Amino acid sequence: MKIRFAVVRPDLLKQVRAEVEGLLHAVNVGDMDGVDMSTKRLMGLTVYCTSIDLSEQEWRTFLDGIRVKNPEFESSYLLPGIMCAPLFPQLSVSGEYVLELPIYGDLQEENVNV
């Protein structure tokens, strides 16, 4: 498993937020088909956004760094950009967001704009 972090362009934020809500609902009710569909749609929405893929270990290290500063942090797929500045140093403006999305199997083979 890898985790893709994609900087969400402002023109996509509304669509990404709506799809993240669908993904969270699918996860909470155990709808794996819904999870897969939402994941594919999110990947499609952000395919041309600046992104980076982390290994599971790199992701855990990144989250540990966040939790040192904010022990109650819980990931909900859409992170304030400023939290991701270690991954994307160009993020410094409030209002920017980064999509954090686990990717498996065939989804790993899609093109990524790094």
Image (cartoon, grey):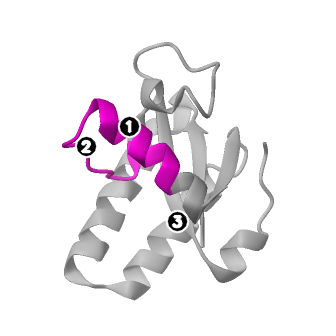
- Residue under numbered circle 3: 102
User: Which quarter shows the N terminus?
Assistant: bottom right
Please provide percent x and percent y for residue 97: 46, 33
Q: Earlier in the sequence, mark 3 or mark 2?
A: 2
What is the x, y in percent for residue 110? 77, 66
Is 44 positioned to the left or the right of 18 in the image?
right
Q: Which residues are magenta?
A: 60-78
Q: Residue at x 45, y 69 (%)?
A: 38
For disc 3, the neighbor class at 10 Å (few under 14, some 14 to 19, many from 20) is some
In the rendered structure, which amino acid carries the disc numbered 2? Phe
Is 64 rendered above or below residue 7? below
Residue under pointer 1: 66
Q: Residues within 10 Å of mark 2 (few under 14, many from 20)?
A: few
Judge from the rendering whether residue 23 lies leftward or rightward of residue 93; answer left or right. left
Residue 14 location in percent, x, y?
Answer: 40, 40
Query: Is residue 69 found inside the magenta-colored segment of the image?
Result: yes
On residue 73, the disc is 2
Q: CA distance from mark 3 to mark 1?
A: 18 Å
Q: Are marks 3 and 1 in contact (CB under 8 Å)?
A: no
Q: How many marks?
A: 3
Q: Residue furthest top?
A: 93
Q: Residue at x 18, y 43 (%)?
A: 72
Amino acid carrying mark 3 in the image: Pro
Label 1 neighbourhood size at 10 Å, few (<14), some (14-19), many (20+)? some
- Quadrant of the snapshot with the C terminus: top right
Q: Secondary structure at mark 1?
A: helix
